[in-house]
Amino acid sequence: MSAYDVSIVSIIGINVILAVSLNLISGFCGQISLGHGAFFGAGAYAAALTMVGSGSVALAIVAALVTGSVLGIIVGFASLRVRTDFLAVTTIGVNFLFVGFVRKQSWLGGEMGISGIPATGLGAAGNMTMILLFAVATIALSFYVGRSWMGFAFRAVGEDEGAAATLGINAGAYKLAAFGIGTALAGVAGGLYAFFTQFITPDAFDFIFSVMLMAMVVIGGIGSTWGVVVAAVGLTLLPEAIRFVNDYRLLVFGGLLVLVIRLAPGGLATLMQNLFLRARRS
Amino acid sequence: MYYIDLAVTGISFGCMYAMMSVGLTLVYGLLRILHVAHAAVFALGAYVTVLVANATGSISLGFLAAVIVTPLFGMAIYRLLYEPLLKYRPDVPMIASVGLLVLMQDAFRIVFGEQGITFRSNALVFTTYNFSGITVSAVQIAIVITAAVVFTGLHLFTTRTRVGIGWRATVSKPQIAASFGIDPIRVRYLNFAIGSALAAVAGGLVALLNNLVDPGIGFVVSYKALAIIVLGGLGSVRGTLIASLVLGLVEAYGTIFIGAWLDRDAIAFLALILLLMIRPQGFTGARAA
């Protein structure tokens, strides 16, 4: 593999972790979060600082995970008070607040970010392998959660909170769990990103990035793990594969988001399911 | 004197926020959709104002063109994007709206360039008046006067005319309004038309103030508008006006006091998140979240 391939596969792995973890929160549990970039960023900064301080990869990953999930649970408390589109606005706010805060902190490098993060010592290919392992683990976790009692409760809360509560499901606890797990994974993705680039700036975690992640989830089919994985891989490769798309990345992402919601609100997953059903019926 | 200067800045920004948020809160009141793409309408208004002003040499003609073009665009968004999505959860049209905003933003960048465009002649921006030590720019005065005229007009329209009363009736009780012979679909178009025109005026004024329209013009302002309408209690015009002025002032003073550790643009969201945690239904509490 060339160095270019290694970096592309690494980015795909990171985006898969992010999209699948966002799908846990927004797809399974129905809590629309447009601030996933903030948790990704928090993890990246935590890992970067730990690496600069101690140089231990394992410690950096733990720091990224804990930072992501602590911030996530705090925001999760917001989801107990505000719902649907109010929650979406709150999470947008969290994203702006995160970037606005980090930009002004000299100990976080301010606008310039943190550069010269020590290498993991695994090499580019080793980093890529580690990222892929985490991505596979994330996908496996997503499937496991999807089939467990917890996944059932998530979907019940996502579909109809009142009905779920009537069945004795503690909606608040499950929402917090969804936020906690999803943002912990985003934090880990942030740590992996910091290992991969060795250089982070606040702008990498802005609201636009969160929208791109939401685009992956929605285009893949909100709630479907496979759909989201396919969309994350496809939407990461698209700008690389087609020169035109790279120049007009946001135009294409925004356009796809509008078209998919307008024409197939269920995303790729529902589209495939319908095709499959039609093929079987004929 | 310095603090009074800040107040002037805060109030003029507040008036600008008010003009751009009212359309947003009206759409929410009527359709329960967070119309994020309203920011694209705002940006379109700014671009049209500058382009037409440069082509004709008259800034007023620029504003006129913007007020004609953007309502058509706003109504098209409703017809093509929102109407077919009304049957889904409210976050579905909202995400579509975010997609449209990102798309439009990039389209502006591609068509008009990264650097944006400026007025060829903009006398207002360099004109300042001095009232016993307080400096006020002509654009700031224009913003405050425009807002006053616009909101007085809107008030008269919604309280004195048949169409305006029908509009308010539809917002508060759609079924009853419809049974009195008011066409709810026409009210929706009216709503998008007026909201978009107001956003376009705000966009044109911001263009005057900065003497620049760049692709990012709508972005941060748009999310502030979201914060404002939530603070104002979604759907409430009065709450939105108060929240706009409060935010303008909080930002102006906040930049001085907490600007060292927080971006100016993040202040609005800090206020928003704090308020939502204490009062999830916003200032006026018109509707539970």
Image (cartoon, helix red, strand yellow):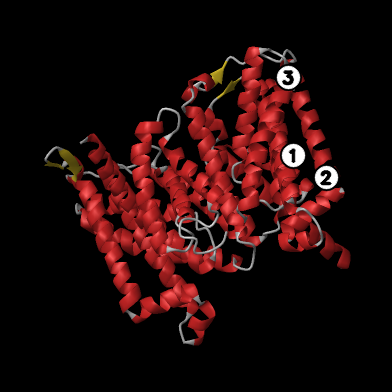
Give the residue displayed 77% in from the left and 50% down from the top: A224
Identify the residue position indicated by label 1 in the image: A181
Image quadrant in which you'd find residue B26: bottom left
Query: Contact, CB < 8 Å: mark 2 with mark 1?
Result: yes
C-alpha distance separating marks 3 and 2: 26 Å
- In the figure, is residue A249 to the left or right of B52? right
Horizontal side of residue A86 vs B202, given as left or right: right
- The image quarter in which residue B241 lies: bottom left
- Circles 3 and 2, Cβ within 8 Å, touching? The answer is no
- Identify the element where label 1 is drawn: helix
Q: Residues within 10 Å of mark 3 (few under 14, many from 20)?
A: some
The residue singled out by tag 3 in the image is: A59
Which x, y percent locates residue A47? 66, 22
Estimate how packed mark 2 is, as few (under 14), some (14 to 19) or many (20 or more) residues with alpha carbons within 10 Å: some
Real-space Cα separation, disc 2 to disc 1, in angstroms = 10 Å
Labels 1 and 3 positioned on one and the same chain: yes
Q: Is residue B267 left or right of residue A142?
A: left
Three-letter amino acid code at the position of disc 2? Val
Three-letter amino acid code at the position of disc 1: Ile
Q: Position of residue A46 (x, y in %)?
A: 63, 24
Q: Identify whether A64 is placed above or below A78.
A: above
Label 2: which secondary element: helix
Residue in view at x 31 percent, y 42 percent: B212
